[in-house]
Image: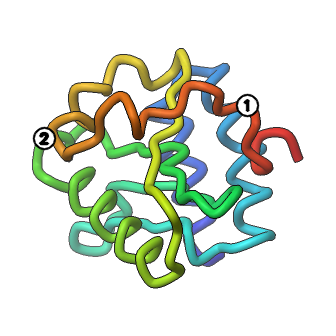
Amino acid sequence: MSDYAAVTELLQETLSEDCFRETMEAFGRQLSWDGELVLVAETGNQLTGVIIGTIDNDNGYCYRIAVKRTHQRKGIGKQLIQALKRRFELRKVKKVMVTVDDHNETILSFYESLGFDQSTLERSWRQLSIVNG
């Protein structure tokens, strides 16, 4: 919760207006349900990345990831994904998935480089509780 303002600023800076609006609703729900699945990355004292995860139907979902533009391609996104996967493993989820929507289609190659494939890219993301309430 102490990073809420910085996370909001990062999301607003890196996401489109529509994506930001959708993400903020899901972010708020996830924080109220299980803030342990919202992870941040810091470089020095500056927040440089965030990943929002959730568990739905015994599957772990990487819902949204954002890395400050000046810190992209430095391994921060990969570290966030790995840290979230560890949290999912501790909770014994059946499968780790990535929610895919119009907003993150452009970074599918990033997820694929980390081992995600068609069986773990979930395109029916609107079913998630954090999106539908």
Residue at (23% x, 62% y) in the render: 79
Q: Nearer the viewer, mark 2 or mark 1?
A: 1
Label ID, residue 27: none
- Amino acid at pointer 2: Arg
Q: Residues within 10 Å of mark 1 (few under 14, many from 20)?
A: few
- Amino acid at pointer 1: Arg
Residue at (73% x, 44% y) in the render: 128
Element at label 1: helix
User: Image quadrant of residue 90?
Assistant: bottom left
Q: Which residue is mark 1?
A: 126
In the displayed structure, 16 sits above or below 62; it is above
Residue 29 location in percent, x, y?
Answer: 79, 57
| Measured Cα–Cα span from mark 2 to mark 1 | 29 Å
Q: Residues within 10 Å of mark 2 (few under 14, many from 20)?
A: few
Residue 87 location in percent, x, y?
Answer: 44, 76
Left-right relation of 36 to 51:
right
Residue 15 location in percent, x, y?
Answer: 50, 29
Residue at (28% x, 38% y) in the render: 111
Q: Which one is in front, 84 or 32?
A: 84
Element at label 2: loop
Residue at (65% x, 75% y) in the render: 1
Left-right relation of 14 to 55:
left
Left-right relation of 56 to 51:
right
Q: Which residue is mark 2?
A: 73
